[in-house]
Amino acid sequence: MSVTGKTQYYTATSIDGFIADEHNSLDWLFQAHQEHDESQWEAFIGAVGAMAMGATTYEWALEHDKLLENPGKWHDYYGDIPCWVFTHRELRAVPNADIRFVQGDELAVHEEMTAVADGKNVWIVGGGELAGQFHDAGLLDELFVQVGSVTLGAGKPLLPRMITNPPLRLVSAKATGTGFAELHYEVPRARP
């Protein structure tokens, strides 16, 4: 019997529920996240076998970290984890990184991702709309939300969905460094 990993949305949000500001920037996160425990990140990323991100998140990372000119940064962050980027646009891949540009059916892509992950977890990096699409398709198992002690006032929402029946199940809530709390939720499946 093989072990099947979980599909997880692991992200950070402001207190008022935004993962990026109104200009799609994550600069707020790096400013607020000065002091954090690297061992928690290393444990999380070590259990990831595949990841997915939306085009806006990918483009921000390309520009913010100049990844086309400095592809080693991609490997510093994510190692050799294959990444599926959901997009309708033509985008350039980070050199020497396993980047797969896809669109459409989350179920078919998720099947491929879980096969490649080989028992490890699938990480939905962001944005919130992409995580919502995985939720809508019944593919999302868990949310790990790092809540920062800042407000943005506007921007890209954490999870632009109404999720009420069944509601998410809180597994844990804990402080994770100066100004951050981590909320861990399970995503129960709706019963017919």
Image (tube, rainbow, N blue to C red):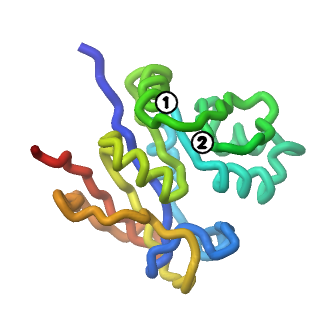
Numbered disc 1: secondary structure: helix
Residue 83 screen position, x and y as percent? 60, 35
Q: Label 2 neighbourhood size at 10 Å, few (<14), some (14-19), many (20+)?
A: many
Q: Is residue 1 left or right of residue 9?
A: left
Q: CA distance from mark 2 to mark 1?
A: 10 Å
Q: Is residue 186 above or below residue 98?
A: below
User: Can I make out residue 154 in this image?
Assistant: yes
| Chain-order first, disc 2 or disc 1 | 2
Residue that label 1 marks = 109
Q: Are marks 2 and 1 in contact (CB under 8 Å)?
A: yes
Tag 1: amino acid: Val
Quadrant, the C terminus: top left
Nearest the eye: 36 or 57: 57
Residue 92 screen position, x and y as percent? 80, 39
Residue 173 screen position, x and y as percent? 29, 66
Q: Quadrant of residue 174?
A: bottom left
User: Can I make out residue 35 in this image?
Assistant: no
At a point 66% along the width and 67% down the height, the residue shown is 24
Q: Is residue 29 above or below residue 55?
A: below
